[in-house]
Image (cartoon, rainbow, N blue to C red):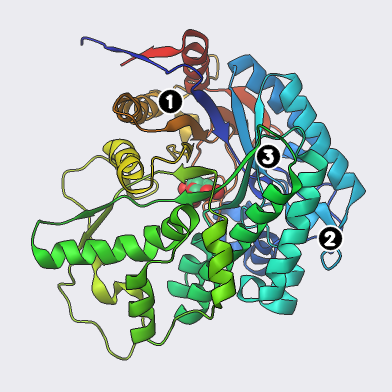
Amino acid sequence: MAYKRYHLPEGFILGAAASAWQTEGWSGKKDYQDSFMDLWYKSNPELWHNGYGPTIATNFYNRYHEDVKLMKEIGINAYRTSIDWSRFIKDYETAEVDEDAAKYYSDLIDDLIKNGVEPMICLEHYELPAALFQKYGGWGSKHVIELYVKYAEQVFKLYGDRVKYFFTFNEPIVIQTRSFLDSIRYPFFQDTKMAMQWSYNKILASAKAIEAYKRGNYNKDGKIGIILNIEVTYPRSSAQHDIAAAKIYDLFFNRIFLDPCVKGVLPDELLKILNYHHCCFEFTEEELDTIKNNTVQILGLNLYAPARVKARDSAWNPSTPFHPSYYYEKFELPGRKMNLSRGWEIYPRIMYDMAMRIKNEYGNIEWLVTENGMGVENEGNFKNEDGVIQDDYRIEFISEHLRWLLKAIEEGSNCKGYMLWAFTDNVSPQNAFKNRYGLVEIDLDYNRNRRIKKSGYWYKEVLKNRYFDY
Ligand code: BGP
């Protein structure tokens, strides 16, 4: 097979991502410092694969030096993780900082920088303090927004001089979709209006945190943005009804955050539909101004799989509460390559299509792929005699996705980097350690020891050469 050489553009950031709750473990956390994810795990540990959850996770809290060493060995340019709000703050009302946690994050940031790895810090990767969920209903409450901004300011004050990339939220839509729309995750209740209020309140919270960041002038090179999980949407056919269905899907799952965060305006079509179904969120004109005046300075997109959408073939059951799927059905395109463990279609072209859309419809804002990756079950079966996982499928996956991204950059996309999910294997909701995503294996049988996979060595070569052949 003839290979082609793909060069990374000058200054392109090739890195890896993770989050606090999926890696740190509970070491150092005080009893009251549960996050929403901890609460969920405590409520239903049996729903998590083999009972693995955030308890130990990868024990990153105690072993991050080891991981940073591996990052240096592989040579990644940047590492994205989050600060666990529930750990970092001692008193959620006053935003008094927990000194131990503050020192831990400070040391981690220093260690990354010392080893040539740019830290990228997200303020909420579902680590809303459990107490704020229990007492105020979490993101449904405007008071929680104020507490979040106070927390964010503490983070900026302590680390803003050293951290150049901040993100207000990771995938802010996910809890609403899974918990309140589809009701398949804790706390398992269906409430479409609440889902919409949470989404709106997070949009507002993000804008307010951006406002606070700009006010503080923490770092002349600093930037703040948001990380959205975009489901690049393709209609079944070019028939009007399929196109309309795909547009509505895109509206409810992509534009709902993209438009206000990047353009500063909520889509009119969305408000119309929500009003028609009596589930629009509460908002004020003043809040809309805050959203308008505080759009993101950089955008993070998590891109995994396409959404294939068609008009409904079956009738809507009128006795069910309104759900956006009133307007569409999802389907699988036969014959496509699938990531079977996740049930996701592998369609690397999403990188190109989304990149061009950002260029053409969103003012060509500077952006990063903040997640893309392949979760695979039973990787232990692919070890060579030295015990190194031979994950050629991951190398292929990354190469194909990068290739499409580089093509878009050649055509003018303002994409500045690619962060693989994930640096090490880690826990994730329900999936726990089942699907492994890392460049580095976490060995559950051997004390969570770390070992670089074949893909990690491959990534190292790409980082050294600044090109790859595929
Ligand atoms: C993204 C999340 C990550 C991570 C990843 C993989 O949506 O931001 O936190 O979990 O998905 O998902 P999963 O592990 O469920 O396959």
Other-residue count near label 1 (Cα within 10 Å), few / some / many at <14 / 14–19 / ≥20: some
Q: Which numbered marker is on residue 89? A: none
Q: Amino acid at mark 3?
A: Thr
Give the x, y percent position of residue 119. 67, 32
Say whether disc 3 or disc 2 marks the residue closer to the N-terminus: 3
Q: Residue at x 63, y 51 (%)?
A: 52
On the image, which quarter does residue 273 sit in? bottom left
On the image, which quarter does residue 357 sit in? top left
Kindly tell me whether residue 443 is visible in this rendering.
no
Give the x, y percent position of residue 368. 48, 36
Give the x, y percent position of residue 135. 75, 78
Q: Secondary structure at mark 3?
A: loop
Q: Residue at x 83, y 33 (%)?
A: 107
Which numbered disc, 2 or 1, marks the residue closer to the eye?
A: 2
Q: Residue at x 21, y 66 (%)?
A: 245
Task: Judge whether 66 appears above or below 218 on screen.
Answer: above
Q: Which residue lies under the disc numbered 2?
A: 95
Say whether disc 3 or disc 1 marks the residue closer to the N-terminus: 3
Other-residue count near label 3 (Cα within 10 Å), few / some / many at <14 / 14–19 / ≥20: many
State the separation of the CA atoms marked 3 and 1. 20 Å
Outermost residue to the bottom: 319
State the separation of the CA atoms marked 2 and 1. 44 Å
Q: Which residue lies under the disc numbered 1?
A: 391
In the image, taking residue 96 as reference, residue 369 lies left or right, namely left
Q: Residue at x 67, y 51 (%)?
A: 123
Task: Judge whether 12 appears above or below 83 on screen.
Answer: above
Q: Which numbered marker is on residue 58? A: 3
Quarter holding the C terminus is top left
Give the x, y percent position of residue 256. 42, 63
Q: Secondary structure at mark 2?
A: loop
Task: Judge whether 7 appears above or below 335 on screen.
Answer: above
Task: Judge whether 157 appears above or below 44 on screen.
Answer: above
